[in-house]
C-alpha cells in the first residue's frame, strides 16, 4: 500500500490535500503535516477544507492556507489525497476535486471508511490519521521539521484525548517520543489546544453543571443546555462542545445524556457511556447513531419531553 | 549510582519503602512498583505512608498495604528507601525509619532534594520518580508485571498531567509505550485517576466558576471558595483540588488566583501563572512560596481583604 502511495506522490507535482467537513485536529494536522512534507520535496500543494478551522487549532502555522471554497486555479491537480475522511460526503464541496482527478488517494483510520479512492490506505488500528501520515513521511525519507511535528502531535493528541482514550497504543507513544525529540513542547501544545477557553465558555460550563441530575441510583446523569443559557452567557452553541463529559465523569455514572435546545426548537441529545450502554443502539431508537460509547440524535419535541422519553428507553439499556 | 543501589538491594532482605506525606500518584506509584518488584525477588517489603491515600488512587492494587502508623514489627529493616521525598520532613512520622537504619536510599526527582540518605539518586530531569523506579527495575532485570506497570503509569501520568506538562520528555513516552505493551489500559487508568468525580465535587466546580472575575484587562483571574459553598454542596475542602485551573485555562489570563476560606477563618491563596508572573516571588510577599508557575500562601484576614491586597501586588508582576 505504502509503495503505491509513494509512487503516486513521486510521479505527480500538483497535489491537493483535502480534510473533512467540521474539521478536527486530526484532519487539519494530517493536511498540514503532509502539506509541509510534500512542499519540502518541491511539490505544489494546496489545502482544502470546507468549514472553518476551530479556534483552538488556529495556532498551528499554515492554518490560514486552507481554501474553503472552490478556487479558480490555472492548473488541475494531478493527485488528490483525502485525509481522515471516512466517506466522500465528508469532503463536502471538495468532493468535486475527487471527481475531476484520475489519481486519488484516501488515507484514513475510520473503520467505516468506504474506500472511495483509487488507492485506499485505511488502518483502523491507528489512533489517528496523523499516525499514518507520520509513517508515510518517514517512508518517503522526508525529515520531520517543526511544522510537521506540531501538526502530527496535534492530530494524535486530539484524537486520543491526549493519550488517554483506549485507541492510544504503544506506537502512539513511540511517535510522540520522536515528535518531542524534534522539539514539540507538550505544555504549549496542550495550552493552545485545550486550555484556551473563552470566559463565556467557562461560565456556560458552570450553568450546564448546575442542571446535572442523577437518575436510576446514580447510573444515569442528565445535563441541559437551553437557548436561554446560551443567550445569557453570550456564547455560540459550538462553545458547548465536550460539556457532556462533566456529566459522564462522575463516580457511578454509566450513561450521560446531554439535552441541547437547537435554534429551530428541536432537541439534540448527546449520549456518552462508560462500559455497558450501547449509545449507538439507544440513539438509533430516535433516528440517530454513532458509536457504542458516544452517539447522538435529534428529537422534535420539547426539552422536557425529550428528557422523559430518552430516559425511559435508557433505563432498559443499563443491564447491557 | 544505580550500581550502588543495586548492591544495597541485593545484599538486604527486609526492606522498607517510604512515600511522602500528603501522598500523590508518583510517591504511591513508586512505592507500589518497587514493592512488587522486590517482592518478586523474595524480599520482605513493607510500605509506609503517613497520610491517607487519595480516593482516586485507591483503585491501584496494593494500596491497602501501606502502613500509616509505626508498626511493632519483630524485625528491624535492613534497608530503608525513601521515594519521591525531597527532604526528611516529607517522610512525616516515618523519618524514624531512616534514623534507625544504617542503610538508606533516597530516590527522587525534585531539584530541591536535600540528599539526606546514605545513597542519594536525585535526577531532576526525570518527569516523575516513577521514571527512576522504572529504570531501576529494568536494571535489576526484574520483569515488569501488571502491578508494576499500572503503578508506574499512574506516577508518570499524575506528575505530567497525563503527558501534558513541560516536564514530559521523549523518555516519558518511551516508558509509557512499554507500559502499554505490558497491558496498561490508558482509558481505564484515566477514568480511575481523573474521571471519577463525586457529584458534590462537580457541583462545587459550578459554584467556584461562578465566582470567576477578570481583572487587569483579563490578564488576572480570581476565583473564590467559601466555607458556605463547601457546606451548601456538602463536600470536604480536599475535593476542591485543581479547581484553580478553571480560572487559569482562560484565553488571555496570565495569572489565576484562588482564594479559599479555611476552617480557622484564614485565607489560603493558590496562584498559577502561564508564562510571565513568578508565583513563588508573589507568594513569598505573603509568607508563602512554591514554584514559578504554581505557588501559594495563607493570609490571616477576610477573603475580601486578601483578594484586595494580593491583586494589588499581583498587578506589578504582570510585566515580568
Image (tube, coloured by chain):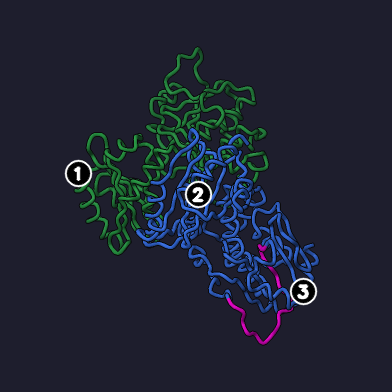
Chain colours: A green, B blue
Main SS of the magenta segment? loop
Q: Which residues are magenta?
A: B69-85
Q: Position of residue A169 (x, y in %)?
A: 55, 51
Mark 3 closeness class: few <14, some 14–19, many ≥20 residues within 10 Å = some
Q: Tell me the chain of label 1.
A: A
Q: Tell me the chain of label 2.
A: B
In this rendering, would A104 be left or right of B115? Answer: left
In the rendered structure, find residue B18 and report the number of the disc placed on it.
none
> Front-most of B45 and B66?
B66
- Residue carrying label 3: B103
> Front-most of B141 and B227?
B227
Distance of mark 2 from mark 1, alpha carbons? 47 Å
- Residue carrying label 2: B306
Mark 1–mark 3 contact, CB under 8 Å? Answer: no
Q: Position of residue B310 (x, y in %)?
A: 54, 45
- Residue carrying label 1: A302
Q: Are marks 2 and 3 on the same chain?
A: yes
Q: Are marks 1 and 3 on the same chain?
A: no
Above or below, A251 against A243 in this view is: below
Above or below, A74 against B9 in this view is: above
Distance of mark 2 from mark 3, alpha carbons? 47 Å
Q: Earlier in the sequence, mark 2 or mark 3?
A: 3
Q: Which residue is at a point 56% across and 51% down the rendered structure image?
A: B161
Q: Secondary structure at mark 1?
A: loop
Q: Which residue is at a point 47% across and 54% down the rendered structure image?
A: B260
Amino acid at each position: 500500500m505504502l509503495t503505491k502511495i509513494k509512487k503516486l506522490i513521486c510521479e505527480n507535482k500538483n497535489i491537493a490535500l483535502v480534510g473533512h467537513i467540521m474539521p478536527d485536529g486530526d484532519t487539519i494536522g494530517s493536511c498540514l503535516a503532509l502539506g509541509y512534507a510534500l512542499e519540502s520535496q518541491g511539490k505544489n500543494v494546496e489545502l482544502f477544507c470546507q468549514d472553518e478551522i476551530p479556534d483552538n487549532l488556529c495556532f498551528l502555522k499554515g492554518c490560514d492556507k486552507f481554501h474553503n471554497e472552490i478556487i479558480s486555479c490555472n492548473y488541475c491537480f494531478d493527485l488528490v489525497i483525502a485525509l481522515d475522511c471516512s466517506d466522500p460526503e465528508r469532503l463536502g464541496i471538495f468532493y468535486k476535486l475527487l471527481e475531476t482527478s484520475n489519481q486519488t488517494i484516501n488515507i484514513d483510520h475510520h473503520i467505516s471508511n468506504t474506500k472511495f479512492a483509487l488507492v485506499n490506505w485505511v488502518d483502523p488500528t491507528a489512533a489517528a490519521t496523523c499516525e499514518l501520515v507520520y509513517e508515510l513521511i518517514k517512508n518517503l525519507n522526508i525529515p520531520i521539521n517543526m511544522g510537521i511535528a506540531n501538526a502530527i502531535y496535534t492530530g494524535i493528541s486530539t484524537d486520543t484525548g491526549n493519550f488517554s482514550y483506549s485507541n492510544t497504543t504503544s506506537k502512539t507513544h513511540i511517535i510522540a517520543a520522536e515528535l518531542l525529540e524534534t522539539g514539540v513542547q507538550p505544555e504549549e501544545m496542550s495550552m493552545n489546544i485545550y486550555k484556551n477557553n473563552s470566559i463565556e465558555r467557562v461560565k456556560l460550563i458552570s450553568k450546564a453543571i448546575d442542571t446535572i441530575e442523577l437518575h436510576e441510583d446514580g447510573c444515569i446523569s442528565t445535563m441541559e443546555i437551553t437557548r436561554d443559557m446560551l443567550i445569557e452567557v453570550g456564547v455560540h452553541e459550538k462553545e458547548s462542545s465536550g460539556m457532556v463529559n462533566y456529566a459522564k465523569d462522575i463516580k457511578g455514572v454509566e450513561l450521560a445524556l446531554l439535552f441541547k435546545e437547537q435554534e429551530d426548537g428541536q432537541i439534540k441529545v448527546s449520549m456518552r457511556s462508560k462500559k455497558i450502554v450501547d449509545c449507538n443502539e439507544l440513539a438509533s431508537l430516535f433516528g440517530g447513531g454513532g458509536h457504542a460509547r458516544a452517539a447522538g440524535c435529534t428529537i422534535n419535541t420539547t426539552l422536557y419531553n425529550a428528557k422523559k422519553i430518552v430516559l425511559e428507553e435508557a433505563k432498559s439499556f443499563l443491564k447491557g
